[in-house]
Image (cartoon, grey):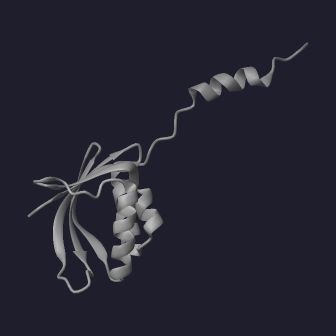
Amino acid sequence: MRVGSPLIFLVPALAAAPAPEAPDPEAVVQAQIEAFNAHDLEAFLAAFGEDLEVATLPGGPDGSSGKARLRELYAERFRKNPDLRAAVLHRMVSGTFVIQRERISGRAGKAPLEATVIYQVKAGAICRMWTLGD
């Protein structure tokens, strides 16, 4: 008696396997905060999508869109501000959005500042980031 090929059983099992889930938005934003505080530029950038859109509200785009531009800005900021840190004061998650109040300290020669930042996360990466002007 001949037994059927094991591949016959494997193919349907692979087709039914669920696709890996992207990290939840809160985890992506938290990883970005941790990388920021560690001044780990590559880990920081890994949290963002290539076509990142950045804006300050009200107003509109602030000219720093895209991961390449983010690399330029934060390489310089980390270099010039060795004590630069972000603390999350409050956080709310709603679907793909993470809204948080942050305190940024360690800016050379400048007082700490607080800002409300809205992150939109899709496919495991921050695709939009809005900072609310107070």
Front position in the image: 41 or 35: 41
Image x and y of residue 127, in percent: 33, 48
Q: Is residue 25 above or below residue 110?
A: above
Q: Residue at x 25, y 57 (%)?
A: 63
Front position in the image: 112 or 59: 59
Q: Residue at x 40, y 58 (%)?
A: 68
Q: Residue at x 29, y 44 (%)?
A: 96
Count all numbered tags in the image, as a single digit. 0
Q: Is residue 131 above or below residue 52?
A: below
Quarter placement of the N terminus: top right
Image x and y of residue 53, in percent: 29, 50
**Quadrant hosting residue 64:** bottom left
Quarter placement of the C terminus: bottom left
- Furthest residue to the top? 1
Image x and y of residue 58, in percent: 10, 54
Q: Is residue 103 above or below residue 93?
A: below
- Furthest residue to the front? 63
Left or right of 72? Residue 103 is left
Left or right of 124? Residue 96 is left
Image x and y of residue 21, in percent: 46, 41
